[in-house]
Image (tube, rainbow, N blue to C red):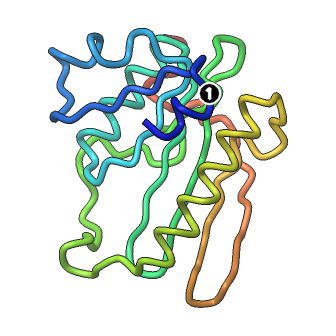
Amino acid sequence: KKLSCINSENNINTVPETLSKDNIFQHLSHSSLVIDTTDNWESMTLINNYCVKNSIPLLSSSVIGYDGQVILFKNNNKRHLCLNCIYPNQNEPNLPRCETVGVLGTAAGLTGLIAAQLIINFFTKNHENVEKLIMINAKLMKIDYINIKENDNCIYNNN
């Protein structure tokens, strides 16, 4: 509501229900950018797959403990790079979860600020850090950028 007051031209939709193969088109079909902050692998891969197949840019962001990561994928037809290129897991990986490890509020805040700035940069045509994995470590006050390359073995290549 606050962003709509600042700029009445924008259209921000939140999805207050679990996304599924049955309802994802209904919620994401008119998106110019999808922002994924879900906390489970099934939802992340569903959203990634939909965005890849429909050439919708995707910002993926997650936080656990002191660490956060953010990446924005262009998802254009000319060059393929997606979440599955980085993490080619079809099954949910056995990793620590927020409910067992927790999330430091400042780590979530830093990650959220970086994600927000990346979105602003994207819409203002500053694509310098697009398709770079941004790793945030709040404990060490460290931010690293990892250049990601296309994965020829990605299951979504040539789709």
Considering only vertical position in the picture, is 67 above or below 159?
below
Q: Quadrant of residue 57?
A: top right
Which amino acid type corresponds to the residue marked 1 in the rendered image? Asn
Residue 93 appears at what percent x and percent y? 28, 58
Residue 91 appears at what percent x and percent y? 23, 46
Q: Look at 35% across and 46% down and name the residue there.
A: 89
Q: Residue farthest to the bottom?
A: 140
Q: Look at 54% across and 39% down and name the residue there.
A: 59
**Taking 140 as reference, is 44 left or right?**
left
Total labels drawn: 1
- Front-most of 97 and 105? 105
Q: Look at 67% across and 85% down and name the residue there.
A: 141
- Front-most of 63 and 158? 63
Q: Quadrant of the N terminus?
A: top left
Residue hosting label 1: 7
Mark 1 is surrounded, within 10 Å at the Cα level, by few (under 14), some (14 to 19) or many (20 or more) other residues, namely: few
